[in-house]
Image (cartoon, rainbow, N blue to C red):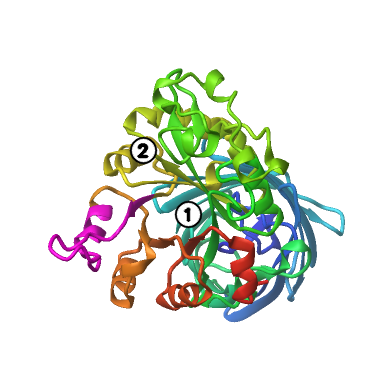
Amino acid sequence: MCMVALAEAQGEPTSLNIIPTADVLPNGAASIEVQLSGGRVSGGYEFMNQFQTEFGLGSGIEIGFDPSIGPNVGSPFNAKWRIYKETARRPAVAVGTFVDLLGTGNPPYITGFKSVGTTRFHMGATRLGQTTRAMAGWDTYPWEPLTIQADYVSGPAAYATIGFVINLPGGWLINAAQLFGNSRYAPNGYIVAVGWTGQVFGASADNHDKDTACNGRHKMILLAHRGESYIAPENTLAAFNLAWKLGAEAVELDCHLTRDNKIMVMHDAKTGRTAGTDLVIKDTDSAELRKLDVGKWKGEQYAGEKMPFLSEALATIPPGGRMLVEVKCGPEIIPFLRDVIDKSGKRRQITIISFNLDVVAQSKKAMPDVPHYYLRSPAKDPKTGQPQPYDHKLIQTALDNGLDGLDLHYSMVTKEFADAVKAKGLALWTWTVNDPAEAKRQAELGVDGLGTDRCAWLKEQMGIR
């Protein structure tokens, strides 16, 4: 949901909708907003109310209907539609239009956005009668608690607006703007709105706000570690597809670069543990690695599973899913990794993680719009061998390298440390928990995501629908 501003055609208001940013609601989601707008006109005040609605239909399609009530409404009923296309590289683009149900209409508009680190810039343009309209804005990403936006309409009654949106827990938002210029509502015009965005129908109705493992604004995501690896062979297409089928929101995998510069999915640097034949991945061509059976060790029903290419694994990600890609080798993989991600069409659904600080730091510079987390396990006392609490210097290390979060072994994460991570605007994920009591403790700490080998089972144990 984004900032609203007064749109005019032929000098009369037809809609209070802004030119939206590129995001289109997912299937079954809805956005509903109630607005009050007005200002001093001819010595008095005029007001107009409007209900703004949008509904996501899936496949990047959104429709809406906006009835308006007021003494000077150019058209009280406007329908709208838009189609969203995310390209392999930024910017993402949406095209749509508003349609006056009483006979007039507006030309299509085009909008797009560009993510830069943890922020996002968006812009759009359209033609309204004899005027041209442009919009630009900024918001935080990926959680988007704040949007600041400016809107400009040219022509004889040129005006501009500037305002903000604050997104609140539970999908609620507050939206306000001030108008400047020669519009019938400016220079004393204003817009104030209260709205809600959430899932209202469809298979995705078990959204974040309805899950029980919540802490504050965001639900703790359960991540299928190496896929649904308790049941299916780890790091295989069988494990990834089973995880998605059983309702996982996120899946983690491990990858290496082969001798012929292909990226293949496996945890170990050698293939012996899951394939029987012990080959060093970095010293072996992908064609030879593809001959190995990496499924039979888990059961005859998985015999014939091949070591996946990373491109094949990314292709399994469904709409709304998220894949954490752990890099198990050095920075030499980065140009090839970027190419695979660019070609996948799933760029916004990918996060890169690694224990190698050089990897995540250099990869972040190469792909600044992709989230990167630094993987760590707790240091051990050199005398006793016991794990030690995480040093707060780790938070500064992530910040100094432009990273988006930390992904830590769960055992030594304290409430104090979790709060310190979140206070700096970093995401916090932990690994690998298969115990419901510990998973609940992690949720209470405010962890954003939790890795587990038994994702479907743990969701059931925690009462997450």
Question: Do the CB atoms of the residues marked 1 and 2 lie less than 8 Å apart?
Answer: no
Residue ID for mark 2? 363
* Element type where label 2 sits in the image: helix
Residue type (three-letter) at the residue carrying disc 2: Ser
Instruction: Give how far across and how far down residue 60 sits, in percent.
Output: 71, 48
Report the mark closest to the observer, 1 or 2: 2
Instruction: Give how far across and how far down residue 4 sits, in percent.
Output: 59, 64
The single residue placed furthest to the left in the displayed view is: 383
Please name whichever residue, 103 or 183, is drawn nearer the observer in this view of the structure.
103
Residue 46, by quadrant, is: bottom right
Instruction: Give how far across and how far down residue 439 sits, in percent.
Output: 49, 72
Specify start and end residues of the magenta stretch as a single range.
373-399
Q: Is residue 388 magenta?
A: yes
Q: Residue drawn 60% across and 49% down? A: 22
- Determine if residue 127 is in view: no
Residue 304, by quadrant, is: top right
Q: Is residue 83 magenta?
A: no
Disc 1/disc 2 C-alpha distance (Å): 27 Å
Quadrant that contains the N terminus: bottom right
Please name whichever residue, 401 or 120, is drawn nearer the observer in this view of the structure.
401
- Determine if residue 78 is in view: yes
Residue type (three-letter) at the residue carrying disc 1: Gly
Q: Residue drawn 59% across and 82% down? A: 44
Q: Is residue 95 above or below residue 52?
A: above
* Element type where label 1 sits in the image: strand
Please tell me how crowded label 2 is: few (under 14), some (14-19), or many (20+) other residues with Cα within 10 Å.
many
Q: Is residue 340 left or right of residue 194?
A: left
Residue ID for mark 1? 137
Please name whichever residue, 341 or 5, is drawn nearer the observer in this view of the structure.
341
Please name whichever residue, 313 or 127, is drawn nearer the observer in this view of the structure.
313
